[in-house]
Amino acid sequence: MEFLSQMWSLLGLLTILQNVLPTQLLSLLHSLWQSLQDSLTPYSYFDVPEFLGSAAVEPNALYRHVQLYLHRSLLLSSPSPPRLTLSLPRSVTASSVGASAAPPPSVSLSPNHSVPDAFNGHRAVWTHHADTLQDSLEERRSFSLRLPKRHAAAVLPAYLAHLAAAADNLERSSRARRLHTNAASPRGSASWSSVPFCHPSTFDTLALDPDLKARLLADLTSFADGREFYRRTGRPWKRGYLLHGPPGSGKSSLIAAMANHLRYDVFDLELTRVTTNADLRALLIQTTNRSLIVIEDIDCSLHLTGDRGLSSNNMRRHNKRRRAAAASDSSDDSDDDGVTGADGHRGKVTLSGLLNFTDGLWSCCGEERVIVFTTNHVDGIDPALLRPGRMDVHVRLGPCGAHAMRELVQRYVGAVGDQEEMMLDAAEGCIRDGAEMTPAEVGEVLLRNRDEPETAVAELASELKARVSAADELQWEDSAAELSDESPTKKGRKGFAGWEGKVRILGRLRSLTKSESGRRGV
């Protein structure tokens, strides 16, 4: 009792001194007391506030890293977790809690509680602080880290690097991703608008050649893990892909699978809505790190394809597409906001501006970016865009192969019986004989018969067989036209019509006749 009375007397004296002594002297005494405690304790303490500076405006990135690290690495995996705070967003109703589609509750460390961690044989302790400001409802939140004083200087840099890397991976795997597009806007106000990105395509659902799928996955993974390599070699941390092939070959699905694999935001750049090169640069600056920038149908966008290096046949096809695109531009609605130039084409984005966008100084304004171009006609693209550094990886997506066809059948209609297996073998034979169907066409045949596997496989085999016959007839017509062509361009270099070529064509016609007779049972 005597001890308690002395304690109460001391507390009363301290209260009186606090009211009597000047504020500056009290602050000095508090600092001396803290210094005495720090000199006697075997630990070092490090504070991580939520905001930087006294204005509490600029967020502290390290606080976000600690929050992610504690949430996923320590709190949920601890066998004896400390006191935790559970919360749900306002948009989640009480009836949806516990449903399979409902988001899980957010977990955080309760204020003034601690959680231990271990790193390289050293024990670290994190404590969450939440202090209410005087005469205000706002809180100042922070974390404090406790490390052994003897090893703090050596352990702290490596531990913070480990924490940042873990938080970076966790944020990449858990953050909500968005699909952005550039809106048609007046000059000088180029900007992006976005919606949640929820495309279901993945590399597991793509019907691709196994070797091509493995190469793409390895290249994407190597790129995502290549931070140190790109810094060491002095290269911008970006990569360009060109996806080319006929419509329906799966270019858009592959782009979505790439974004889902990397967990990147997608920026779908519509060049016809960009008025100047300056607006193009402004859009690039607004893209975030870890983004996948998509430019579809590059050969038709603003007539950016050059005429260098094109053969005469490719030139004719290229000019035909240019005329068709020009006719389409003239009939477009006025909401494209394009500026008509002296050549009659909309917009002022030039090939030079696009090259600087993909591989110039402005392309370095950010890290971990993938630029994907798509086209149906790769021969219509200017060679300056095709070189490594702009389009590093060229991926041709053609007609559906035998392996992709079987994969689509398995995915759409499930396992098949012996009779369907025989029809699939016949369908593979048709593919080897030259029948072509894109993955989109194969998928549509299977989709409309997905509840009847036998009908689906039979219709697919029938369609492929019909396309073999159509391909043979087309080859007959081409061969006959070549045989009867007596124009000077078909003559040999010695001035004659080219008997060797005619003999070769006759041999080809004879082989076609035999193959057609064999298929008809003659």
Image: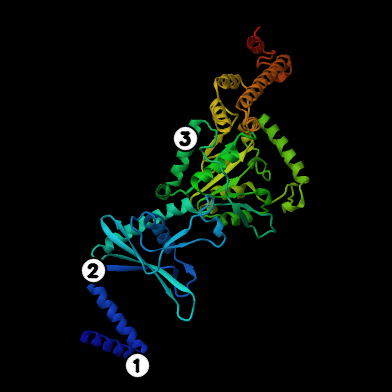
Question: Could you tell me which residue is drawn at 50 percent across and 48 percent down?
Answer: 263
Left/right placement of residue 158 relative to residue 475 reads left
Please tell me how crowded label 1 is: few (under 14), some (14-19), or many (20+) other residues with Cα within 10 Å. few
Q: Which amino acid does label 2 sit on?
A: Pro
Disc 1 versus disc 3: distance between alpha carbons? 77 Å
Label 3 and label 2: CA atoms lie apart by 53 Å
Q: In this rendering, is residue 141 above or below 216?
A: below
Q: In this view, does 373 lie above or below 281?
A: above
In the image, which disc is placed on residue 42?
Answer: 2
Image location (x, y in percent) of residue 65:
42, 60
Amino acid type assigned to the residue bearing label 1 in the image: Val
- Looking at the image, residue 32 lies above or below residue 381: below
Residue 192 in the image, given as x and y percentages of width and height: 62, 56
Relative to residue 31, is residue 326 drawn left or right? right
The image quarter in which residue 93 lies: bottom right
* Secondary structure beneath label 1: helix
Q: Where is residue 188 in the image (x, y as percent from the top left)?
A: 66, 60
Q: Are circles 3 and 2 on residues that touch, CB within 8 Å?
A: no
**Residue that carries the numbered disc 3 in the rendered image:** 214
The disc, 1 or 2, on the residue closer to the chain's N-terminal end is 1
The residue shown at (42%, 46%) is 225
Q: Which residue is drawn at 74% across and 18% down?
A: 487
Q: Residue 20 carries which label?
A: 1
User: Which image quarter holds the C terminus?
Assistant: top right
